[in-house]
Image: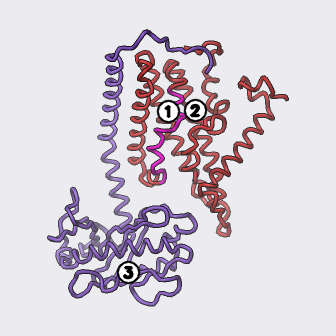
């Protein structure tokens, strides 16, 4: 704006000079990026592991250690490396003596604003969902975010019925949302008044995940009880 | 290299530019997208300000060092590559420091790359000044931006959640003014701050110093 153009304009800049400059800048930047990536990778992975452990231990009280697995149609494999086709990831938590405390898996469905992702705990002995925690959401503060702390809503996940049908192909009763205050049966989730869409997302997420995961997982429970 | 027709600023004036006379948030109104979006809490605001300052300092240094070698035809491309590099670095660093913070800031860390304040500084200042001067100015701008974000974030957190830095201020009976942590609240608070800021600048002509329009009608 003020004064004349400072960079004196020579007749024409040769293409070589431009390519050289951009090449040099790109190289320097590339080196900076690789260095940063290499040096932060360990800390980032450790952070992710800690965050995941904390989340899993929250939905499975009493757990001391955890392992991750992929449930595939061919059986259970350790949850490392890329996920095989058609597999579902889940976590098995053990107490100090190595006894199986419970299983946990992530579930997600579209909420009011974005994906609502939750982690739920599954108790193989009672065939119920007995733990629940929100992983991430972008729901309206003061309305949709009640799924995190609303006591009446959290009570839904003390013993949510997710029994498998005799053929072990799906749930006997799909998990469904009912209007606030009308929950009567074990597989129903009592919605939060005013946050039906978000409540429905939680239920749909858990239902979709359990319908797919439990048939793959339940036949191999003994393997998990033996410590994986 | 001073801009012809303009007095050479002292280092202090150069530093204070961004904090007061050309504050990115309150005077230049630059980078408003993150300023409105992430300032739902004081911690978010400070983290975003720090991340932006880091990108600003890093890109300013490189741009200033290379200012005599970059042909003007490719300068914008060069600046963008440099800025994008530092944004990616800060992205990794924040994820390494705290995942919670990383998730709270979300896509807005990556979006620092399109913060026009940073490209503006590269083009208007860093590419015409030696590294020390450019860095001083960038630090001032970064701090000014951080102060601006903090002014928004602290007010929105106090009114919208009844807390400051997560510490409850008003006890359990406080009914949070939820709209303040929603997008409209960002506009309300920014508008209120601009009102206060402009009123203050017009009330104290001494502080406005050599601002362009100040000579004309500061007493008018």
Give the Cα separation between the discs numbered 3 and 2.
54 Å
The residue where tag 1 is placed is B56
Chain of the residue that carries numbered disc 3 in the rendered image:
A
Q: Colour of chain A?
A: purple
Relative depth, front residue between A129 and A19? A19
Give the Cα separation between the discs numbered 3 and 1.
50 Å
Residue at the image point whose x is 76% and y is 26% from the top: B214
Q: Secondary structure at mark 3?
A: loop
The residue where tag 2 is placed is B141
Which percent across, then down, holds residue A133?
Answer: 42, 69
Q: Secondary structure at mark 1?
A: helix
Above-or-below relation of A204 to B22: below
The chain displayed red equals B
Q: Residue furthest left?
A: A74
Q: Is residue B9 left or right of residue A200?
A: right
- What span is in magenta? B104-122
Could you tell me if the residues under marks 3 and 2 are in contact, i.e. CB atoms within 8 Å? Answer: no
Marks 3 and 2 share the same chain: no
Q: Neighbour class for label 2 at 10 Å: few (<14), some, many (≥20)?
A: many
Which percent across, then down, holds residue B120?
Answer: 53, 30
The residue where tag 3 is placed is A175
């Amino acid at each position: 704006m003020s004064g004349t153009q400072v960079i004196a304009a020579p007749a024409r800049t040769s293409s070589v000079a431009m390519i050289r400059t951009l090449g040099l800048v790109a190289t320097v930047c590339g080196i900076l990026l690789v260095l940063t990536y290499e040096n932060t990778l360990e800390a980032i992975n450790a952070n992710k592991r800690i965050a995941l452990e904390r989340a899993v231990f929250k939905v499975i009280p009493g757990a001391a250690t955890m392992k991750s697995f992929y449930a595939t149609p061919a059986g259970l494999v350790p949850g490392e490396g890329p996920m095989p086709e058609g597999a579902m990831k889940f976590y098995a938590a053990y107490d100090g003596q190595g006894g199986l405390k419970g299983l946990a898996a992530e579930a997600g469905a579209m909420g009011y604003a974005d994906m609502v992702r939750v982690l739920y705990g599954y108790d193989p002995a009672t065939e119920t969902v007995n733990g629940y925690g929100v992983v991430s959401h972008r729901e309206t503060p003061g309305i949709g975010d009640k799924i995190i702390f609303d006591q009446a809503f959290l009570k839904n996940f003390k013993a949510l019925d997710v029994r498998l049908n005799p053929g072990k192909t799906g749930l006997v009763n799909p998990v469904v949302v009912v209007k606030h205050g009308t929950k009567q049966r074990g597989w129903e989730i009592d919605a939060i008044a005013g946050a039906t869409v978000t409540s429905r997302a939680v239920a749909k997420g858990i239902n979709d995940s359990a319908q797919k995961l439990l048939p793959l997982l339940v036949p191999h429970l003994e393997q998990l009880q033996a410590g994986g | 290299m001073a801009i012809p027709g303009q007095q050479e600023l002292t280092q202090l004036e150069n530093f204070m530019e961004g904090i007061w006379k050309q504050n990115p948030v309150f005077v230049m109104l630059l980078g408003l997208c993150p300023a409105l979006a992430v300032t739902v809490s004081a911690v978010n605001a400070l983290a975003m300000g720090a991340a932006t300052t880091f990108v600003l300092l890093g890109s300013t240094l490189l741009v200033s060092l290379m200012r005599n070698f970059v042909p003007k035809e490719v300068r914008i491309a060069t600046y963008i590559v440099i800025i994008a590099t530092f944004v990616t670095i800060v992205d990794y660093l924040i994820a390494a420091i705290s995942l919670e913070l990383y998730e709270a800031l979300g896509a807005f860390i990556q979006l620092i790359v399109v913060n026009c304040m940073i490209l503006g500084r590269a083009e208007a200042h860093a590419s015409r000044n030696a590294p020390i001067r450019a860095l001083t100015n960038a630090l001032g701008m970064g701090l000014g931006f951080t102060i601006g974000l903090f002014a928004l974030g602290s007010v929105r957190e106090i009114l919208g959640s009844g807390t400051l830095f997560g510490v409850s201020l008003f006890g359990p009976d406080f009914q949070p003014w939820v709209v303040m942590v929603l997008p409209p609240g960002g506009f309300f608070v920014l508008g209120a701050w601009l009102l206060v800021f402009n009123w203050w600048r017009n009330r104290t002509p001494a502080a406005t110093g050599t601002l362009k329009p100040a000579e004309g009608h500061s007493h008018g």
